[in-house]
Amino acid sequence: MYPYAEGLWAARNQWYVAGWSDEVTREPMERWLLNEPVVFYRKEDGNIVALHGRCPHRQFPLAKGRVVGDRLECGYHGFTFDQSGACTRIPTQEAIPASCRIDAYPVVERWNWFWIWMGDPEKADESLIPDHDIVKLTDPDWLPVKAATHLLKARHQLMHENLCDLSHLTFLHPGIIGVDAVADTGFDVSGEGMWYRDARAMYNQEPTGFFSDILGYHKPIDRLMSMEFYLPCLHLAEEVFLAHDKKDGEPGRELGTYKVHHAVTPATDHETHYFVAYSRNFATDDDNVTNIINGAFAAVLQQDVDAVEALEEMLRKSGDGGFKDFLAKGDVTSVKVRRSMEALIRAELPQ
Amino acid sequence: MSITWMTLKVVRKDVEAENVVSLELADPTGKELPTFTAGAHVDVEIRPGLIRQYSLYGDPEERRRYRIAVLRTETSRGGSVTVHQSLRQGDTVRVSVPRNHFPLNEGDHPSILLAGGIGITPLYGMARALHRQGAEFQLHYCARSEARCAFLGALQDADYRDRVRFYLTGQSPDYRLDLDGVMSQAAANAHFYVCGPARFIDQVLETGHRHGIDEERLHREFFAPPEPAADADPDGAFEIRLQRSGQTLAVPADKTIAQVLKDHGVEVELSCEQGVCGTCLTTLLEGQADHRDFFQTEAEQAANEQIALCCSRARSPLLVLDL
């Protein structure tokens, strides 16, 4: 499936951000993930249960049922399932055949979001989830903030590739975070396999109004900008702002750093969940700065959403097979990521 | 935690030799670090946007330290100078989990380690690993002078010091490594490991090929973009031979392989012409490419089986293409 090779879409044996912690309560909640309906609820002890969201009896959405103790009762004919997906009650009969069961998925809560593993539960190693201290969501010196939630009408690959080529900042987000220098500055790409990073440094920049406002600094700045991708779900943008008070290439005084966490999770073939957070290490007790950033990011993220949805619409109308896109220098990371994502998916195909 | 990057602290920085410093890197909280084996390297982010690879020379059983040694090169793109000048004890740097593209071959056979200058770092670790296994090995270490020999004292005092030979190329020719001699005297099943400047590696590989040593027994490691081989025109002209048609064409310094092919009416599919998209990758049958594409991984480039015609050049005088 474009932009991947035919038949390749998304890897299952991976952790994906499934949503925000506060979305899951004692009321069942449905979310489509990797082309499956998943129903989430909390047990009495507060832990999250994730089960396949379709009753095997009459295919009724289990999210329309109710939680009884730690179990989920279907709202149609009362079939009841425990946290392992085993059926514990069939109201019209006593015998419960072993084949009456649904899949249960491993879930891990980290910071304010929860991750799900949709593949082989035996392989669900929690240590594969990016470390939340290192990405500065749980570091006490940083202030993490929930920024946005979207259900994109676009395949997940399009958002990944949007985030892999930052030269789009100049053209899609002019004025706020995009200046000419972003697209005009060369970048270094590093990484292989499950992690990539591209980084560029822009010196002696007039700060945009947005940057001046949040940094409280109006003189020229240096911007060290990087984008990391922890495959297959989490992109981590970083901007280090330095006072431009040394010569080019020598780091000046740090004014502040923010990191933006973009979780991109496939919902269905042509829909994608997009959960965005950010954290910063400056003005952490200043709500006004938080409000300014929230406003700016909401506008920027909407521009990204509109762009990838426009791409999906173009592909839908014109057909997404039979052409090869023209690639440029700015696509180095995208191409490497495509190859890695395809390899992850291929590794799961029956031999 | 098995993510690719860790934040580690420089807990010690020492001068090892002229222009060589060693760094000890540890987790700031003292946690155990991911394991590695002799020959492994890590990526180190010296400052944002500047990432370099360094071999680990420490003992794999020492679980709370990584040790790297860095040669200062003025021609570098800034990595080694920053390490030497700016990186201080107490600073943190981001370090990848170790990867090993240069592992010791398993099996019962002698190993011959050939180090050129700072290329000693992975081989020093290998020598200790081989010694511990009780395996048969030799370490041949070429450097310009004693002052530039990193780990000189440690190697001279090592339990296995009788297996180490030093060659100081700045002195008389008597002190030079006789590669032909080493290779002709080596057991027929010996494995060779070489690390050092590209020129040194080329010399070893070329001598190995002359002695009929097959590729599986010649192991190499290089990180820096390869310097042009001594016999290749620097950044310049070389020849290509098209295996299927038998044509030999000259590629001048100012033209790409793709342009030369086009000029001679040979059809090749091109797209980005920047080494990004991989469209023009072609099977390379003979010769050492100077890979300049971004599409192939480091390992694929090192395997030297395919070449991007739009941008890559040659480190040997002739490339034979499957065209």
Image: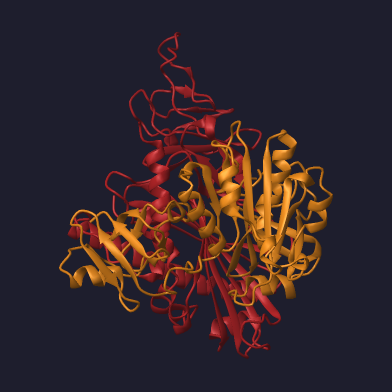
Chain colours: A red, B orange
In the image, is residue A100 above or below residue B133? above
Seen from the viewer's position, the closer of residues B30 and A83 is: B30
At horizontal 47% and vertical 38% (from top left) the residue drawn is A13
Please give the name of the residue rendered at 42% of the width and 74% of the height, measured from the top-left corner: B235
In this view of the protein, which residue sits in the foreground, A347 or A212?
A347
Q: Residue furthest front?
A: B174
Splitting the image into 4 quarters, where does residue B76 fall?
bottom right
Give the left or right position of residue B268, taking residue A9 as reference: left
Q: Quadrant of residue B272?
A: bottom left
Is residue B146 rendered to the left or right of residue A77? right
- Residue B226 position, x and y percent, is 50, 65
> x, y percentage for residue B148?
74, 67
Quadrant of the image for the C terminus of chain A?
A: top left
Task: Spot the residue most to the left.
Answer: B265
Q: Residue at x 56, y 52 (%)?
A: B180
- Can residue A301 be seen at all in this image of the molecule? yes
